[in-house]
Amino acid sequence: MSIVWDPRVCTGCPHTPEPPCARVCPCNLLYRGHDGKLACRDKTGCWDCAACVKACPNEALYLSLPPVIGGNGARLYGRAYRDHTAWRIQLSGGKVIEIKRPALNKIVQSTCGVESSSNSPKTE
Ligand code: SF4
Ligand code: SF4
């Protein structure tokens, strides 16, 4: 697996001091490059955790999946919202699988008996 980004879709998030994808990377691999778009210091240091994928407001990033999961060229897209994460797996034949999972904080809240009704994106 590896992260891939489309420079035609990446805006570089110029309105933020640090792009959301870079802010959430646990390995500090991502940054805004000289061209104003996403850049990566070292792809070999990537954990494939998909935190950057979920944080991007434009779905400019995806995880390239191994053929055993979805065939050649399969991709994992995602978007984190306050209450849930919406995953989208794009298989090699064009079929799309959508999976909605509660956000971790939502699971903790329900475990503790606390409710939240907000559904706005985390990164906006
Ligand atoms: S969050 Fe998305 S649009 Fe913003 S810099 Fe990262 S990849 Fe580009
Ligand atoms: S997948 Fe995880 S470790 Fe890899 S670049 Fe994205 S946030 Fe960083």
Image (cartoon, rainbow, N blue to C red):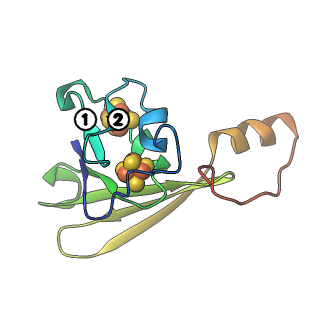
Mark 2 and mark 1 in contact (Cβ < 8 Å)? yes
Residue at (38%, 68%) from the top-left corner? 97
Question: Which of the 4 image quarters holds residue 50?
Answer: top left
Residue at (37%, 25%) from the top-left corner? 28
Residue at (63%, 50%) from the top-left corner? 122
Q: State the count of labels.
A: 2
Residue 67 pos. (x, y %): 14, 53
Q: Earlier in the sequence, mark 1 or mark 2?
A: 2
Question: Which of the 4 image quarters holds residue 3?
Answer: top left
Looking at the rendered structure, which numbered label has been put on residue 40? Answer: 1
Residue 48, visible in the rendered structure: no
Q: Is residue 87 above or below residue 91?
A: above
> Which three-letter amino acid code belongs to the residue tagged 2?
Tyr
Q: Is mark 1 within 8 Å of ligand 2?
A: yes
15 left or right, relative to 12? right
Q: Circle 2: is it few (<14), some (14-19), or many (20+) Cα within 10 Å? A: many
Helix, strand or loop at label 1? It is strand
Quarter of the image containing the N terminus? top left
- The quarter of the image that holds ligand 2 is top left
Residue 45 pos. (x, y %): 24, 24
Residue 29 pos. (x, y %): 31, 28
Residue 16, visible in the rendered structure: yes
Question: Which of the 4 image quarters holds residue 9?
Answer: bottom left
Quarter of the image containing the C terminus? bottom right
Looking at the rendered structure, which numbered label has been put on residue 31? Answer: 2
Helix, strand or loop at label 2? It is strand
Residue at (40%, 60%) from the top-left corner? 59
Q: Is residue 22 above or below residue 73?
A: above
